[in-house]
């Protein structure tokens, strides 16, 4: 079951158990919210990765004093013990629902739970959805791809942007990148990604323009520098390692999806990425030791 199918199914019934798996945290959080909204009278209990199977099953097996149903949401650890949960699901308490969150691109094996794919929707799905939403207008594939990347592939953000463009471009039959760029509200992550990409490509004009825009929007300079550090670090580990994207993503504390795109964009630039990463680590140390400012460090990266 994908996210759209979950949304449709909740209009008629709620299953005893769900496994929300994937690397799109937005979709996972939205799926939890949808299930909770479908159980408005349920008592909500949340558990983190440190919860034991016994704690989860005990919560599910008990009846709330205040409501007729209980919703238990638990985040799974890397190597969860599922025997107790599988045993409970053979005879679940009527009205109670379990939601297990698995931040991996493949689901754990729980026979009696409904698996919901919360991986980012690929362009092959998003592009037709975009085209359908703006019909009878048309959009070039490059423009659709740009929109997807600038919004992180989050369909809620895509929907917001398309509604805006429908007002701007009522008289334009075909939308291209040149139509989207001036008015597109990019996510902060995408803007910082563009800044890091411009720095790596030594595109001084582009990097300066992006940095000026970020500064004018009152984005904290430490957040900007920290974001660039994180991006260059991802690019470095993505190009220097052949390990599985899930392993690298966990090491860096980011979505495996980000590692996939770093390898796509910088796979042939390992030497450049390595040199830039060494330089940014040096500047980070200088900032922390008071030898330079964040503003000066960003200028040093851009005008190197």
Image (cartoon, helix red, strand yellow):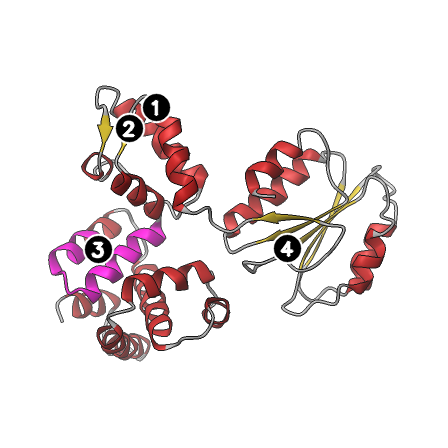
**The magenta segment:** 188-210
Which structural element holds mark 2? strand
Mark 2: give few (<14), some (14-19) or many (20+) Cα within 10 Å: some
Q: Is residue 198 magenta?
A: yes
The x, y position of residue 137, in whole percent, is 29, 24
* Picture quarter with the N terminus: top right
Q: Is residue 271 magenta?
A: no
Where is mark 2, residue-wise? 138
Residue 59 drawn above or below residue 231: above
Residue sitting at 69 percent across and 34 percent down? 38
The x, y position of residue 230, in whole percent, is 36, 66
Residue sitting at 39 percent across and 37 percent down? 158
Residues at badges 1 and 2 in contact (C-beta under 8 Å)?
yes
Which structural element holds mark 3? helix
Residues at badges 4 and 3 in contact (C-beta under 8 Å)?
no
Q: Which sits earlier in the primary sequence, circle 4 or circle 3?
A: 4
In this view of the protein, can residue 50 be seen by the observer? Answer: yes
Residue 135 got which mark? 1
In this view of the protein, can residue 58 be seen by the observer? Answer: no
Where is mark 4, residue-wise? 101
Please identify, in this view, whether the residue under mark 1 or under mark 3 is nearer the observer.
1
The x, y position of residue 244, in whole percent, is 47, 70
Mark 1 and mark 4: Cα distance apart in space = 36 Å
Mark 2 and mark 3: Cα distance apart in space = 32 Å
């Amino acid at each position: 079951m994908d996210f759209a199918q979950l949304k449709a199914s909740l209009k008629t019934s709620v299953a005893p158990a769900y496994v929300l798996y994937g690397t799109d945290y937005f979709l996972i959080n939205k799926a939890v919210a949808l299930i909770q909204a479908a159980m408005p009278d349920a008592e909500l209990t949340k558990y983190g990765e440190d919860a034991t199977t016994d704690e989860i099953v005990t919560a599910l097996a008990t009846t709330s004093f205040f409501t007729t149903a209980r919703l238990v949401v638990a985040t799974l650890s890397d190597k969860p013990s599922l025997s107790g949960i599988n045993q409970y699901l053979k005879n679940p308490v009527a009205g109670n629902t379990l939601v297990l969150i698995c931040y991996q691109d493949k689901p754990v094996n729980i026979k009696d739970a409904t698996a919901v794919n919360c991986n980012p929707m690929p362009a092959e799905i998003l592009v037709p959805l975009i085209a359908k939403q703006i019909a009878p207008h048309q959009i070039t594939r490059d423009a659709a791809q740009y929109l997807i990347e600038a919004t992180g592939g989050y369909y809620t953000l895509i929907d917001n942007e398309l509604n805006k463009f429908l007002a701007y471009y009522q008289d334009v039959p075909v939308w291209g990148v040149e139509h989207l760029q001036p008015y597109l509200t990019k996510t902060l992550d995408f803007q910082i990604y563009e800044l890091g990409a411009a720095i790596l490509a030594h595109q001084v004009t582009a990097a300066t323009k992006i940095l000026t825009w970020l500064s004018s929007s009152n984005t904290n300079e430490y957040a900007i520098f920290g974001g660039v550090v994180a991006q260059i670090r991802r690019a470095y580990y993505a190009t220097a390692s052949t390990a599985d994207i899930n392993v690298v993503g966990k090491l860096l504390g980011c979505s495996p999806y980000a590692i996939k795109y770093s390898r796509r964009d910088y796979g042939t630039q390992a030497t450049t990425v390595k040199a830039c990463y060494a330089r940014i680590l040096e500047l980070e140390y200088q900032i922390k030791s008071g030898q330079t400012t964040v503003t000066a460090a960003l200028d040093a990266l851009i005008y190197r």
